[in-house]
Amino acid sequence: MKMKRNLLAGLANSVWSVLIVLAAVPFYLKYLGVEAYGLIGFFITIQAVMSLLDMGMSPTINREVARCLASGDIKEAGKLLHTLAVVYWCLAVVIALLILVLAPLIAEYWLQPKQLSSQTISHAVMLMGLVVACRWPIGLYHGALIGAQRLTVSSGINMIMVTIGSLGAVSVLAFVSPTIEAFFIWQACIGLVYAITIRIAAWRIIGKPQQNKFDIDKLKSVWRFTAGMSGIALTALVFMQLDKIMLSNMLGLEEFGHYMLATIVVSGLYVLVSPVFNVIYPRMTVLVTVGNTEKLIDLYRLGTRMFASVIFPVAMVLAIFAKDLVFVWTGNMGIASSVAPIISLLAIGSALHCVMYFPYAMQLAHGITRLPLTINAILLLFWVPLIIFFTLTHGALGGAMAWLVLHVFYVLLGIWMTHRSLLKGIGAKWLFQDVGIPLMLSIMVGQVSLYVAQDETYSILVKLISASILALVVSALSISMSPQLRTIVLNSLKKKKIAAA
């Protein structure tokens, strides 16, 4: 029951957060312009780059809290949380100073503006550093709450803060000052309030240790896992952000803004990823700890099938109807025409990336960090040349092409390497049944949707309604083709009927 409640809370949080952010973007474009919005996209990239300094501490506290909860020794997790918190708050100061020093160089030599002055960009980058620093400790306390399986609390706080942050930013731009500096000042204030609020919530649930002291022994006890997670974080960051970092220099700021708009739209696919991962990872950790392999396999395979049955149809609809969706969102056909092809390729690649979170969660649940680190390192050997080649030949669209090619390779390589050492013998079933069937069904129905999208006699509303119905049909068909999932769904419906009666 708790698992279901946490999943629903996580889904509500993700959906609401994405909707609020998407709703705010047209206002950002209106008051700031595409070029200044490119700076917001650059800020998102900087925030991701700075996550390197996390050094694996956030997933470590997640896993340790889950383990201590399973063994009934939650006080030990509190001691580790306090020790890591000291490190986190110190790093926040380091981040602010680092970005402050680098801001003039970034403005002068890295970004490629056409209208904004170097001084404006420099001030904006300095403020970005302040925002990142204020928000920095949030990840630690968020990880602790997830490990304690209190996603409802974490999600509630995040929904409130995202709402205030986005709606407040629009209000500041509309009624106070329509400048990029005003935007980042507001975000810094909200970030600090967010960090303090989630800190209070985490300590109330975990419980403060009797002695608030920095315990180096606690760090030593988890250093291997933390070091492995740090390596994974480094390679994963490059994996996820390298295209944006390179394109911010290779493209003009306006074209880069179009690419970032596309990534914002496609990020909607990750609405499901975070809540699902935040539920299955602690649960898998518990199952590994108690040695229940049978339930672990069921959670792994059925979870993947259910997830793929939703994410692939949605990604296919997004890829085919990208132009119509962006036009409805922004009201600008020029932007929609430029961004739509990028969205189509990013959506398919991102859907493949999403399903790989299940093998990743299983690897971490076993405490094996070397495996995902090795996979990421191999992928990076191909990532850089792919970006350079496709971007030089196709511009922003080339970055999306590289993303798709990389993730096709990721699925094939990742699942082969994973099941050589973990849950041996189920790799082919996972790939061809749990992932392959939903993917092929989505592709076949996508061909039908393509005719609808290209027919100009249909209105945009009719197209989007048709697309939604097709996505639901594919999801239902994919789930019904799995006997176990079909039984689970039917039993759930029977229970609801009995409860209603």
Image: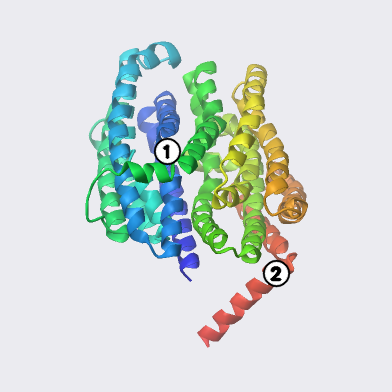
The residue depicted at 40 percent of the width and 65 percent of the height is 72
What SS does tag 1 mark?
helix
**Is 154 located above or below residue 184 in the figure?**
below
- The residue shown at (38%, 37%) is 27
Mark 2 — residue? 484
Q: Does label 2 or label 1 sit earlier along the sequence?
A: 1
Seen from the viewer's position, the closer of residues 323 and 233 is 233
Say which of 245 and 63 sits in front.
Answer: 63
Closer to viewer: mark 2 or mark 1: 2
Type of the residue with mark 1: Val
Q: Which residue of the protein is positioned furthest toward the top in this rendering? A: 109
Left or right, 81 with reference to 469: left
The structure residue drawn at horizontal position 42% and vertical position 28%, both measured from the top left corner, is 46
Residue 125: % across, % down = 34, 23
Examine the rendered structure and indicate whether residue 122 appears above or below residue 484: above
Residue at x 46% of width, y 68% of height? 2
Give the quarter of the image for residue 217: top left
Residue 25 image label: 1
